[in-house]
Amino acid sequence: MLGAIGILFEQASSRGHLQENAWGPLPFELTIRNQVRASLSTLAAARALRAELLENQSAASRTALSAAEDSGIAGWVAGDARDPARTALLAELLLRHDLEVYQLAQSVDGEGLRFEPGAALWIPHRQPNGRLAHALFERRLEFPDDTFYDVSSWTLPLALGLPFAELNELPAGAAGARLSAAPVAAGSLQAATTQRTVAYAFAWGGLHAGRALQRLHAADIMASVATRPFTAHSADGSVEFEVGAIVVPSGVSSDPDALHEVMARVASEDGLDVLRLTSGHTPDGIDLGSPSMRPLKAPRVALVVGSGVSSYEAGEVWHHLDLRLELPVTLVEGDNLERLDLPSYTHLVLVDGASSAVSQSRVRDWVAQGGVLLSTRGSARWAARELFELELDDEQDDDGPDAGSGERSPAEHEPTSGDEPPSYGDYEARRAKTLVSGAIFAARVDSSHPLGFGLGPGPLALFRRGTTPLPRSEDPLAHPLTYLDQPLLSGYASDANVDKLAGTPAVMARRLGAGSVIMLADDPVFRGVWHGSARLLENALFFGAVIKDTRALTSAALEHDADAPEH
């Protein structure tokens, strides 16, 4: 609510009927009594301060307009012509919070990007909720207080993976109609012609492409992924497809009408443009029968949960698979992992903390026989060390006030000349400045790699917690995503930590026997809102098995090839 005052009340949990803590026994009835008293006292205080609170709310609306004018920021333009569903999601979130949102009526350039009419949104700064709009779109790198124990940036379009730009001035006539509801991102199924449909195809870049592919798997429909680009003959002429395109052959279906019905749902419910391909031979690139058109199998996923496992991260992965992709997932308590019939699963997911429940030899054997291990954060570093013997720079990862101290550079601890000696009482505040508790970092994407399908062409915004990087493999092609040399996009991270993470792998993927091990330095679906990097999770699940073994091309071999004369 505009002009509201937020109050956080935290009550220690009794963990059921009764819990012993440092102050003695804490019964459940006391926690309930405290909640009731806090609620009633808050209502009483609001009544007593009614006039002041109403004035504060009114002033917030009045001053928002002048504050926007004084800032010099006219507003923000955001959208992606290639992904209407992602743009529609942004509009829906903004409208839900009573923000003014307009269609773009003409092309607008900003920050090196071009935004097209009908495919982008205009969010003016000068509006009653302008302060909220500014908070959602700002990219902040400087703070009056750089002590953070939690997230320091929530830049919404970066979380959604949407191009956006801040404008100091909007060209006259560029703002179109104001939206009263989010646009419907409906796709289309290409109409049938007299030519025979040999296959259906859709691009992999859309927000709901993963759900569409899972829809095919659930219906036992054969599908392939293009690992190289191609141009195909469609019902309306030639069309170009990038890597990651999904091709569904019609000839192997025993029920063409049922296949057509599913593809129609992909178009209408998943917002994708589905094309009819009329020939297996292509005018350019791979043919539909090429070995580079890799058949896909439905993933059968086991997710380790329970004691020692980050419940937040396990829940985020479960939420994305179950609700967003509609992909069934088996939750396995770490204590029961040894009794799990691993060969009946294609994928095993280890989020932060889950590696403590894993038998290294058993998982190694399972991967070598064709399994795909997906690991994140601490479990990713475990996989790098235990399965590939890759050395880590620093085993201590700092995520919050209770994390270990780790190794710090002298510059982060010692006072400079003329400063007061450090005080014991300042320890927590000084240590908080050495953490990366939640900032947005940019990674370079190799969009030709299966884990990079649908993520190109620009850098990807990742939500970063912790200061320990993934180790680097000798095989440079094992790093489809690496942090930029200047990776910090928004939020707080000390210069030393930015330098420490710059250029390190954000993702590593290695073959192990017949299977694959995928290691993500970060949480790809943080809080269920980081839709931009969620594609990493989806690519690992759907395409992890098609990753090639590239160890033959070490850095030395690549440098030798680069120096060799051309023929």
Image (cartoon, helix red, strand yellow):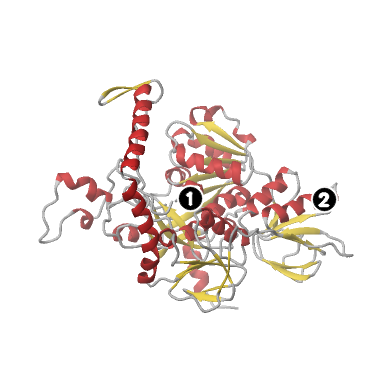
> Which residue carries the number 1 mark?
520
Q: Which residue is at the front of the view, 397 or 47? A: 47
Q: Kindly identify the amino acid type of the residue bearing the numbered disc 2.
A: Val
Tell me the kind of residue under disc 1: Leu
Q: Image quadrant of residue 450?
A: bottom right
**In the rendered image of this protein, does residue 28 appear above or below residue 480?**
above
Closer to the camera in the image, 269 or 7: 7
Question: What residue does disc 2 label?
Answer: 252
Q: Position of residue 471 (x, y in %)?
A: 41, 52
| Total count of labels | 2
Which element type, helix, strand or loop, lies under badge 1?
strand
Residue sitting at x 72%, y 65%: 286
Residue closest to the eye, 406 or 124: 124
The C terminus appears in which quarter of the rendering?
A: bottom right
Q: Residues within 10 Å of mark 2 (few under 14, many from 20)?
A: few
Q: Residues within 10 Å of mark 1 (few under 14, many from 20)?
A: many
Rendering coords of residue 71 (x, y %): 36, 70
Which of marks 1 and 2 precedes in the sequence?
2
